[in-house]
Image (spheres, rainbow, N blue to C red):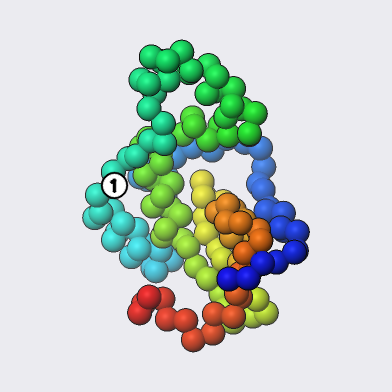
Amino acid sequence: MSISTEEPEEIPTSSTHRPILLLDSQIVPHGQEEAKALRSLNQKTYALTKCFDEDLLVDTDMQEEFIKVFQDVGWSEFVEIPEGGIVLLTKEFLMTLRTDTQREGTYVWFRLFNIDYELTLRQFSNLLDFSPQCTVSEDLAGFNSVEF
């Protein structure tokens, strides 16, 4: 990894509506490959892990402050996803995650809430909150994801 002085690319966003996944039937595979991936993902067990302890927040009178902090950083809607919806969203993301190294640069595709996203590798890196100072190698020729 090396240090880059480039500014991070802006990540495309969708409309402002608040979609939500509540039922398995809301995940619609587009093609046989996605259907196969979804069948495989449905056979897995998912453990939900919270990044904070709600009881501790209540016991320490920090619940309101915690909500304010999440609002201030723009994450207020993020914490409102129901736990079952997180599993469904994870399945939808994983069954649709693809990369394309055939054209100039590397592109990543995925779907969330039935909305398709196409990002450059740099945008995807930024979306995952990797440091923008880390250079992303877009030369993935010869990379074998099966062996990885």
Pick whichever, 30 or 81, lies toward us. Answer: 81
Residue 61 place in picture, x, y as percent: 46, 13
Using the image, determine if residue 100 lies above or below residue 22.
below
Q: Which residue lies furthest to the bottom in this view?
A: 142
Could you tell me which residue is drawn at 39 percent across and 69 percent down? 33
Based on the displayed image, in which of its 4 quarters is residue 82 positioned?
top left
Could you tell me which residue is drawn at 41 percent across and 76 percent down? 145
Residue 40 place in picture, x, y as percent: 28, 61
Pick whichever, 97 or 129, lies toward us. Answer: 129
Based on the displayed image, in which of its 4 quarters is residue 22 positioned?
top left
Residue type at the position of mark 1? Tyr
Using the image, determine if residue 50 lies above or below residue 38.
above
Q: Residues within 10 Å of mark 1 (few under 14, many from 20)?
A: few
Residue at mark 1: 46
Residue 129 place in picture, x, y as percent: 58, 52
Could you tell me which residue is drawn at 68 percent across and 53 percent down? 12
Residue 41 place in picture, x, y as percent: 31, 57
108 sits left or right of 96 in the view:
right
Pick whichever, 24 or 84, lies toward us. Answer: 84
Badge 1 element: loop
